[in-house]
Image (cartoon, grey):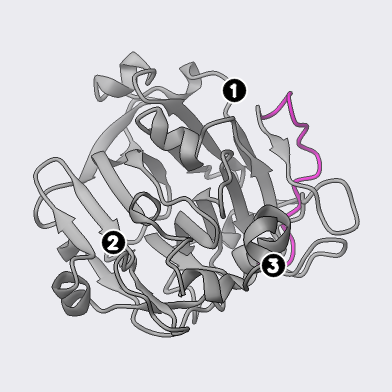
Amino acid sequence: MANIGIENRAAIFVVLFPLLIMLPAVTAGGYVKERSYMGPDFFSRFWFWKWPDLTHGHVDFADEATARAEGLLQASHDRVFISADRRSVTGGKPRRSVKIFSNDVYNSGLFVITLDHMPTGCGTWPAFWMTGGNSKEHWPSWGEYDIIEGVHLNTQVATALHTSKGCDQSSLVAGKDFGGTWQPAASKPSASDCYIKADGQWLNQGCSQIGPADSMGPSFNARGGGTYAAQWAPLDTGGGYFRTWFWPNGTEPADLIAGKPNPDAWGLPYSRYDLSPTSCPTSHFKNMRLVFDLTFCGDMAGVSYAEKCPAEAARMSCEELVS
């Protein structure tokens, strides 16, 4: 089968700037850098998922030795490269790819990442996210924060939360509390309930907001990428929030570039979710790891394939396309 869905430009993450983990400083509102994920030892700070895809993707996740042997990984002092298999015609078998979880776990922080290329193309489903525990034994009770996610040729990022019952975000107003828009739900206007089995929403849709133009996809890559900042800020009072910003390459705020980030000076985030003892307790999220992965088809890209890639869908299935 022709390798249409994952041509060379379509199946790589390139991390241009260190993935910085900032934790609150002693001074109110400030952050200090705790950790930078960059350098030749990048992959030693992650463990590799080598089991079946829990989202039913047409993918074969490789262990580290296999991924290195097949050229799916590279790391230098200023670049990290993560790729799916871009050469093989699999003959209908799942395509080899990579899914990694950070060794470190977090319970708050400011997470900053700059990418100069993201996967794009029919059938692709790239994501950078956080999940409690290992996403199998502790999900969804320890929560999930999808920072960067999209499918096919999407040019606007989706940022979402997935939780157990009891995390409602319906009080937040698009354009007032956050700059993006609510993702439509199955039978109601907005996917504003983070519970994975919420009434009126697709199974595991969670609460999901759509980001700005050119925040992923072909246009993101053509502009040289950009920077995301994701803030998880629970408060001792039981309140707090998740806030997420995006800047195209070259437009990042000066305080961030200087290593002295002040999120309160960055203006309206494109995504915001509030934590509250009554509507969404902080206990929904704990011990979360950073995750990079690229899968194909599956629960998200497979379901939307016919709508988003009608020409390809008229000729072959999503699984056939990426094989």
Which residue in the structure is indicated by mark 3?
303
Q: Is residue 321 left or right of residue 167?
A: left
- Residue extent of the magenta highlight: 164-178
At label 1, the amino acid type is Leu
Q: Which residue is mark 2?
A: 104
Q: Residues within 10 Å of mark 1 (few under 14, many from 20)?
A: some
Q: Amino acid at mark 2?
A: Asp
Residue 189 colored in magenta in the image: no
Give the overall secondary structure of the magenta segment.
loop
Expressed as whole percent of the image width and height from the top left, the position of residue 74 reads 16, 57
Q: Which residue is mark 1?
A: 268
In the rendered structure, which amino acid carries the disc numbered 3? Val
Q: Earlier in the sequence, mark 1 or mark 2?
A: 2
Q: Is residue 272 left or right of residue 249?
A: right
Work out whether 228 lies above or below 88: above
> Which residue is depicted at the point 35% across and 42% down?
117
How would you rate the neighbour count of disc 2 (Cα within 10 Å): few for under 14, some for 14-19, many for 20 or more? Answer: few
Rounded to the nearest angstrom, the CA distance separating label 3 from label 2 is: 33 Å
- Residue 270 quadrant: top right
Residue 32 versus residue 174: which sits nearer the camera? 174
